[in-house]
């Protein structure tokens, strides 16, 4: 296991890449629509797929509780900047932390 530091540049790149993947697969106009044509289950599947693809960098670098909190906040903020509603940004950030926690056991 590699215990290299998770640098700020790599951290920011991961968050940005993940937010871009989410936006490409499930744009804000779709996710924020109250009359969804996409089911909640499908949205969660899309989020899971995007997160799993982004986790390779995290597998190489173990992050602690503070790193996870920073990661969660940064992703939430990045998604809100793109145009997602708070509820969707929170759901995505929570799913990311769930995946990170499972992969670091």
Image (cartoon, helix red, strand yellow):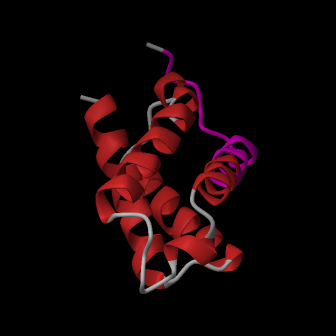
**Residue ranking furthest to the top:** 1
Q: Is residue 68 left or right of residue 24?
A: left
Judged by its main secondary structure, the magenta piece is: helix
In the rendered image, the quadrant that contains the C terminus is top left
Front in this rendered view, residue 78 or 50: 50
Eyeballing the image, is 84 above or below 1?
below
Q: Residue at x 60, y 38 (%)?
A: 6
Q: x, y (%) of residue 57?
A: 58, 30
Q: Is residue 24 left or right of residue 96?
A: right
Task: Look at the image and say whether residue 3 sits in the magenta stretch.
Answer: yes
Eyeballing the image, is 25 above or below 101?
below
Q: Residue at x 52, y 43 (%)?
A: 50
Q: Residue at x 63, y 53 (%)?
A: 15
In the rendered image, the quadrant that contains the N terminus is top left
Query: Which quadrant would residue 80 be assigned to in this image?
Result: bottom right
Q: Residue at x 70, y 41 (%)?
A: 10
Front in this rendered view, residue 12 or 51: 51
Q: Is residue 73 left or right of residue 6?
A: left
Q: x, y (%) of residue 30?
A: 55, 72
Q: x, y (%) of residue 70?
A: 50, 61
Q: x, y (%) of residue 4?
A: 58, 25
Task: Look at the image and say whether residue 51 sits in the magenta stretch.
Answer: no
Front in this rendered view, residue 65 or 105: 105
Q: Which residues are magenta?
A: 2-16
């Amino acid at each position: 296991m590699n215990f290299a530091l998770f640098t700020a540049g790599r951290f920011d790149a991961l968050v940005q890449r993940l937010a871009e993947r989410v936006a490409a697969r499930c744009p804000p106009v779709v996710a924020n629509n109250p009359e969804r044509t996409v089911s909640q289950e499908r949205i969660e599947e899309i989020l899971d797929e995007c997160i799993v693809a982004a986790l390779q960098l995290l597998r190489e670098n173990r992050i602690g509780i503070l790193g996870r909190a920073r990661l969660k906040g940064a992703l939430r903020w990045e998604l809100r900047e793109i145009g997602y509603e708070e509820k969707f940004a929170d759901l995505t950030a929570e799913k990311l932390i769930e995946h990170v926690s499972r992969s670091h056991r």
